[in-house]
Image (cartoon, helix red, strand yellow):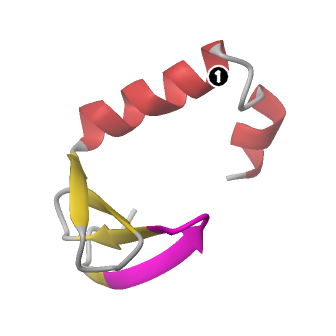
Amino acid sequence: MSKEELGPKYIGDGVYVHNEGWRIVLAVNDASNKVVYMTESEIIGLIAYAKEAGVLTQRQLDKL
């Protein structure tokens, strides 16, 4: 998987995501309003939580 830096991308409901190469940054309402910095462990934790909460199914994860 590539670790290249990617510019901001709107992913819906006022949320933007940006890959800084070693972490993912989430911004709200504007791509420059960075509010959450997530490394690999935080991303895995978020996915695990979404799966546990029933927001993501294994089938959906398999499609990624």
Q: Is residue 2 magenta?
A: no
Across and down, in percent, residue 47 comes to: 51, 32
Q: Which amino acid does the dot numbered 1 rest on?
A: Lys
Count of numbered tags: 1
Q: Is residue 13 magenta?
A: yes
Across and down, in percent, residue 17 comes to: 40, 68
- Left or right: residue 56 versus residue 25 is right
- Residue at the outermost front position: 29
Q: Between 43 and 36, which is closer to the camera in this rendering?
A: 36
Residue at point 19%, 68% (across, down): 21
Image vertical order of residue 13 relative to residue 36, above or below: below
Residue designated by label 1: 51
Q: Between 18 and 29, which is closer to the camera in this rendering?
A: 29
- Residue at the outermost top position: 52
Question: From which residue to which does the magenta span run?
Answer: 7-15
Quarter residue 43 falls in:
top left
- Left or right: residue 27 versus residue 33 is right
Residue at point 40%, 62% (across, down): 1
Count neighbours of disc 1 (C-alpha within 10 A) and say few if under 14, some if 14 to 19, many if 20 or more: some
- Residue at the outermost right position: 59
Residue at point 52%, 68% (across, down): 14
